Amino acid sequence: MTTDRRHFLGGILLFLHVPFSNSLAMVTRRYVTFQATRRDALASLGAAGGSFAFAAPARGINQCKSNSHNCINVEWGPPASLDSEKAVAGALRDALESYPQRGQSGADCNGWNVVSDKLEEGGELAAEFRSCVGPAALTMNLGQVGLPPGTVRVAQCGRGCERFAHEVVHLSQPFIDDLRLKLEKNDGRFRVSVRSNSRMGSGDLEVNRKRLVFLGRKLKEEGWEVPIPKYAYEQR
């Protein structure tokens, strides 16, 4: 970390009354993790020939790394009564639409949106889910900060504080998780390959599991086969 970055982070943490040495260590670790993640992403992009498509598909969708604690692969089976791509895709969309924009069970408080939907074109449905912003997000993004976003005391910090407060809040933005659904037909039966994963970090506070449990419960009520979602490391 350069001297300028150290001074910038030091100023933020000093203003927020946070021990610099401990917090700087946490921020540094997070920065290194982010850099490594970015390198991995670029390597995957190059391997895919410049495409953001998953590099090593299995059952049509990329598989989590075997030791991952924030990525889940699972396969859902629609009932025989859904005998067309249109019917299966429609049921999946209905289940997804039932997911609350305010999240549930402490997950995805900042909403979600569908990025692309090519279920009936041999592709995937891709959705993004935004995490709750609280102490965990602040810790991961900035270090051990004991203030929720937006609580910087503007009246006590003088000229330029509005911009400073904006920067602090910006550093505590929600994390993004990705959900991928792909419709396939194997041995005359439709199946849905599913992947839910976090973009950053090594853990996820169980939010990927909570998301899939909610969606799976909705589908199970309609007669789908829905196994219990397990993280990759749990399936070794």
Image (cartoon, grey):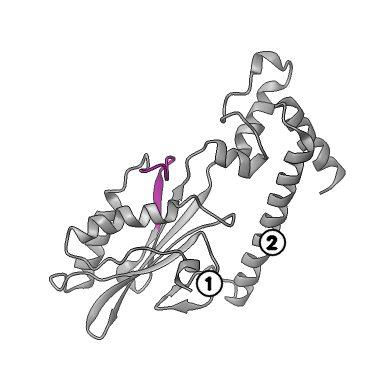
Q: Provide the residue designation for mark 2.
A: 36
Please state which amino acid type lies under the numbered disc 2.
Ala
Residue 172 lies, with reference to residue 1, above or below; the image says: above
What residue span does the magenta drawing correspond to? 105-115
Query: Which residue is the site of mark 1?
Result: 66
Residue 174: x percent and y percent?
A: 53, 43
Find residue 31 and name its label.
none
Q: Which residue sits at x=62%, y=65%?
A: 41
Q: Magenta segment: does it hold 130?
A: no
Residue shown at 76%/37% (left/top)? 9
Residue 12 higher or lower than 215, as above or below = above
Which residue appears at 64% of the width and 19% of the height?
Answer: 153
Left or right position of 189 against 15: left
Q: Nearer the viewer, residue 159 or 27?
A: 27
Secondary structure at numbered mark 1: loop
Magenta residues, dominant SS class:
loop
Quick one: which residue is furthest to the bottom in this view? 187
Outermost residue on the right side: it is 3
Front in this rendered view, residue 161 or 214 = 214
Residue 37 pos. (x, y %): 64, 61
At 67% across and 40% down in the image, what residue appears?
Answer: 143
Q: CA distance from mark 1 to mark 2?
A: 18 Å
How packed mark 1 is, by other alpha carbons closer than 10 Å (few <14, some 14-19, many 20 or more), is: few
Image-quadrant location for residue 81: bottom left
The location of residue 7, given as percent across then percent down, is 83, 36
> How many C-alpha atoms fall within 10 Å of the one at disc 2: few (<14), some, or many (≥20)?
few
**Type of amino acid at the residue the image marks with label 1:** Ser
